[in-house]
């Protein structure tokens, strides 16, 4: 694993070193025939400052490391394309530098990216007006300043287009992300029970029907609380809700990750198990350990009693639908209730 902090510090030093070397190289190579004052103020400093202003505006509006790095890389590629097009001998020496400069900003801080962009803009502007450049040899007359200004207008327009596209892209991405999050939330609300946080009857019905369609083997455990109405009547519905939540957490602690636990409605719960061998053991563990826990509500101790029905779907060729399966396991559960409750009954 790389030490990113070390890489960042190293890159900061390299960027500063590059910056110093480029500035020294550029000013040493300034053509005497144009005069340094004219060259620096008109051809390099002003357009570079305009480009830098756009960069800074961009960073204030869009603060994303990866997008920022892409922007610096785009600038470096533009500089390389310009240099390759006109093939100035001195400019060619900076090709690898521009590429490294743009790439070095990846996953780096904004200050480094801004500095890199300044170097690239500054250097490109300089190479546009170097003495003997093929660019200006192609122009009629000697009006190189007009050409430099025009070229820089193009550079700045390209910068604005890139910034605008990225800004619009960010806005669109934000809208898409927001829409996706809302859709995800809506989908979650459709299949998650609000009170207990487990799956609801919609998801239960979908899973069972899928298993029937795919001819999968599975086992159902249906749990229905005994005398739950008495809890609501005696302690109130808030107490009843607390009991359901505590019972949900208790049952979840007894299940494997692959088991699907759903609240069907009211005080009815279903567990879908793929392992046919563990259904009875799971039901017995739930029934046995429920004696160890209870719900405490406003100083009252509420114990759990419930009846359990079991149904095994092991004949994948059996012609049966979802409704018939629910009727069978429901019948087994009610047989447990009618024979005293607080017990397990398997569908015959």
Image (spheres, helix red, strand yellow):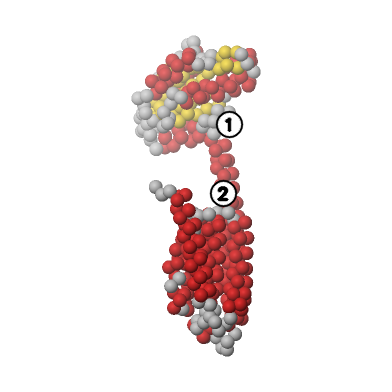
Res. 282 image quadrant: top left
Image location (x, y in percent) of residue 172: 59, 55
* Mark 2, secondary structure of its residue: helix
Image location (x, y in percent) of residue 34: 57, 82
Closer to us: 283 or 124: 124
Q: Which of labels 1 and 2 is toward the front? A: 2
Above or below, 67 relative to 84 = above
Task: Report how many numbered discs are placed on residues in the image.
Answer: 2
Image location (x, y in percent) of residue 50: 62, 68
Label 1: how many residues lie within 10 Å, few (<14), some (14-19) or many (20+)? few
Closer to us: 161 or 63: 63
Image location (x, y in percent) of residue 55: 59, 62
The reply, left or right, for residue 243 in relation to residue 83 is right
Compute the Cα span from label 1 to label 2: 24 Å
Above or below, 161 relative to 179 = below
- The residue depicted at 63 percent of the width and 21 percent of the height is 238
* Mark 1, secondary structure of its residue: loop
Q: Is residue 74 among what the camera can see? A: no
- The residue depicted at 52 percent of the width and 30 percent of the height is 198
Outermost residue on the top side: it is 340
Q: Which residue is mark 1?
A: 194
- The residue depicted at 41 percent of the width and 49 percent of the height is 2
Is tag 1's residue or tag 2's residue first in the polypeptide sequence?
A: 2
Label 2: how many residues lie within 10 Å, few (<14), some (14-19) or many (20+)? few
Q: Is mark 1 in CB contact (under 8 Å) with mark 2?
A: no
The reply, left or right, for residue 156 in relation to residue 341 is right
- The residue depicted at 53 percent of the width and 18 percent of the height is 225
Q: The C terminus lies in which quarter of the figure?
A: top left
Res. 187 image quadrant: top right
Q: Which residue is mark 2?
A: 177
Above or below, 50 relative to 34 = above
Above or below, 255 relative to 87 = above
């Amino acid at each position: 694993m790389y030490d990113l902090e070390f890489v960042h510090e190293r890159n900061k030093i390299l960027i500063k070193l590059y910056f110093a070397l480029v500035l020294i190289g550029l000013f040493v190579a300034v053509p005497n025939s144009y005069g340094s004052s004219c060259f620096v103020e008109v051809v390099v400093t002003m357009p570079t400052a305009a480009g830098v202003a756009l960069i800074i505006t961009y960073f204030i509006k869009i603060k994303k490391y990866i997008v920022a790095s892409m922007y610096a890389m785009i600038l470096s590629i533009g500089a390389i394309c310009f240099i390759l097009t006109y093939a100035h001998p001195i400019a060619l020496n900076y090709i690898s530098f521009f590429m490294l400069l743009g790439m070095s900003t990846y996953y780096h801080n904004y200050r480094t990216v801004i500095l890199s962009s300044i170097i690239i803009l500054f250097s490109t502007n300089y190479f546009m007006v170097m003495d003997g450049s093929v660019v200006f040899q192609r122009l009629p007359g000697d009006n190189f300043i007009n050409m430099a200004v025009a070229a820089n207008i193009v550079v700045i327009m390209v910068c604005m287009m890139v910034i605008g596209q990225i800004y619009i892209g960010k806005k669109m991405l934000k809208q898409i992300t927001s829409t996706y999050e809302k859709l995800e939330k809506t989908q979650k609300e459709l299949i998650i029970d609000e009170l207990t946080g487990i799956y609801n009857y919609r998801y239960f019905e979908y899973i069972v029907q899928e298993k029937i369609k795919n001819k999968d083997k599975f086992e159902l455990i249906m749990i229905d609380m005994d005398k739950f109405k008495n809890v609501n009547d005696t302690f109130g519905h808030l107490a009843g809700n607390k009991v359901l939540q505590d019972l949900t957490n208790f049952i979840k602690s007894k299940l494997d990750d692959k088991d699907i636990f759903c609240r069907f409605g009211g005080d009815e719960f279903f567990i879908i198990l793929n392992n046919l061998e563990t259904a009875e053991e799971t039901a017995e563990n739930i029934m046995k350990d429920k004696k160890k826990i209870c719900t405490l509500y406003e100083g009252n101790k509420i114990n759990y009693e419930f009846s359990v029905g079991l149904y095994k779907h092991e004949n994948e060729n059996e012609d049966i639908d979802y409704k018939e399966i629910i009727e069978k396991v429901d019948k087994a559960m009610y047989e447990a209730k009618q024979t005293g409750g607080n017990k397990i009954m398997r569908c015959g």
